[in-house]
Amino acid sequence: MPYISMFFGIIIRMFYKEEEGPHFHAFYQGQKGQFDFNGNMLRGNIRSKTVLRLIKEWAGTHNNELNEDWILGREKKEFKKIEPLD
């Protein structure tokens, strides 16, 4: 699963699965979560409110790019990197 962004120790990855709706995965210190493109955790075990807030902020800022990457995945093309939070 290729990474599309990294910031503050959070790694964001995406892979396309036709049977699931648009989503991305976040990894942080052994914890992981699956998120919709608004940054809401669909499943996972990330408990830090700060990390969840940062992921939500990042997703809200880059919603269009996330959708573009999802389309690229559907077309079996390489994902584009997305800018991290600063």
Image: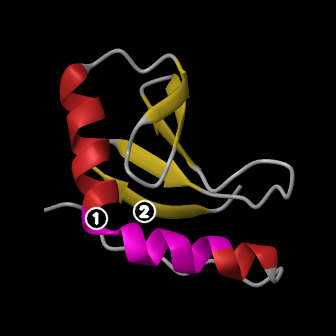
Residue 84 marker: 1
* Helix, strand or loop status at disc 2: strand
Q: Which residues are magenta?
A: 61-70
Q: Which residue is mark 2?
A: 5
Location of the C terminus by quadrant is bottom left
Q: Earlier in the sequence, mark 1 or mark 2?
A: 2
**Above or below for 36 versus 60:** above
**Above or below for 22 versus 46:** below
* Helix, strand or loop status at disc 1: loop
Q: Amino acid at mark 1?
A: Pro
| Residue at (20, 60) in percent of width and height | 85
Name the one closer to the observer, 43 or 29: 43
- Left or right placement of residue 42 versus residue 72 in this view: left
Residue 68 locus on image (x, y percent):
55, 80
- The image quarter containing residue 58 is bottom left
Q: How is the structure coloured here? A: secondary structure
Residue 18 marker: none
Q: Is residue 62 magenta?
A: yes
Measure the C-alpha gap from mark 1 to mark 2.
Answer: 6 Å
| Residue at (33, 69) in percent of width and height | 62
Residue 30 locus on image (x, y percent):
51, 22
